[in-house]
Image (cartoon, rainbow, N blue to C red):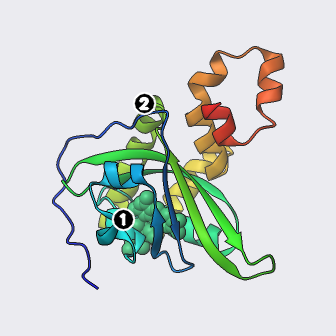
Amino acid sequence: MAIINKPTPVMEEIVLDPSKTIMSKTNPKGTIEYANDYFMEISGYDEHELIGQPHNAIRHPDMPKVLFKWLWERLQKKENIHALVKNLAKDGRYYWVITDFEVKTDGKEVIHSFFARRKCPPRSAIKTISDLYKKLLAIEKAQGVEVSEKYFIGFLEERNQTYDEFIEEICLFEKQRSLDLKDLQYHKRKGLFVRMFK
Ligand SMILES: Cc1cc2nc3c(=O)[nH]c(=O)nc-3n(C[C@H](O)[C@H](O)[C@H](O)COP(=O)(O)O)c2cc1C
């Protein structure tokens, strides 16, 4: 099967419709088995071009490697994870997503598939995360991924946060400011996507 030729990135953003979800399903190796219509619309690919391809087909070169290293380590441990990702469309434009990754097992220990549901992240979260990813990428290019990982760990340690806590904080920053204490306590018991989009 032909591998997708990577487009040259252009500095133009595709802004997502906040009411819609981009969804894909992969096998345990990350090969795309299903993608919904909104995935096709935003990425610019047709089903026959994408299905059967590795998911790095839409990887944007501005994304640091360490992020995907952590993503795969978590998925292999069967842990669901949220991540902020910049993706590359077929015409070279980019789009930011907050992604909810879900691991499906056969009911026992064996991973059956992975699901990714992506939505439009808040603008303030994009600003914060792109500043961090730029630093990680620059370190990676100069020193390699092991060194960028150390920086990433130090960055989170300074905040006394896990990656998930950091993502939650920057994605919910604006929403939580508008909640009173009682609503906030209720809100904190829900999953990130429910808290962001319901
Ligand atoms: C369910 C699922 C969804 C993924 N979605 C994306 C995505 O939207 N964008 C992306 O760049 N990588 C995505 N990945 C990660 C890719 O498999 C890959 O690790 C990443 O693009 C980095 O490419 P590389 O491993 O060749 O460096 C996804 C992986 C899985 C399992």
Apparent side of residue 102 relative to residue 133 in the rendered image (left or right): right
Marks 1 and 2 sit apart, C-alpha to C-alpha, by: 25 Å
In the image, 126 versus 99, the foreground residue is 99
Tell me which residue sits at (54%, 58%) in the image: 116
Above or below residue 62? Residue 170 is above
Callout 1: few (<14), some (14-19), or many (20+) C-alpha neighbours within 10 Å?
some
For the point 23% across and 58% down, which residue is it?
A: 90
Q: Is residue 66 visible?
A: no
Name the kind of residue labelled 1 in the image: Glu
Q: Disc 1, disc 2: CB below 8 Å? A: no
Q: Quadrant of the N terminus?
A: bottom left
Question: Which quadrant does ligand 1 occupy?
Answer: bottom left
Q: Nearer the viewer, residue 104 or 141?
A: 104
Rendered residue at 77%/38% (across/down): 190
Under tag 2, what secondary structure?
helix
Q: Where, by quadrant of the figure, is residue 168 drawn?
A: top right
Q: Position of residue 151 (x, y in %)?
A: 50, 57
The residue at 31%/58% (across/down) is 60
Label 2: few (<14), some (14–19) or many (≥20) C-alpha neighbours in 10 Å: few
Q: Position of residue 128 (x, y in %)?
A: 45, 37
Is the CB of the residue bearing disc 2 within 8 angstroms of ligand 1? no
Name the foreground residue: 7 vs 138. Answer: 7
Residue at numbered disc 1: 140
Residue 97 is at least partly visible in this image: yes
User: Would you say 163 lies left or right of 42 here?
Assistant: right
Q: Amino acid at mark 2?
A: Arg
The reply, left or right, for residue 156 in relation to residue 43 is right
Residue 84 location (% of width, % of height) = 49, 48
Res. 123 mark: 2
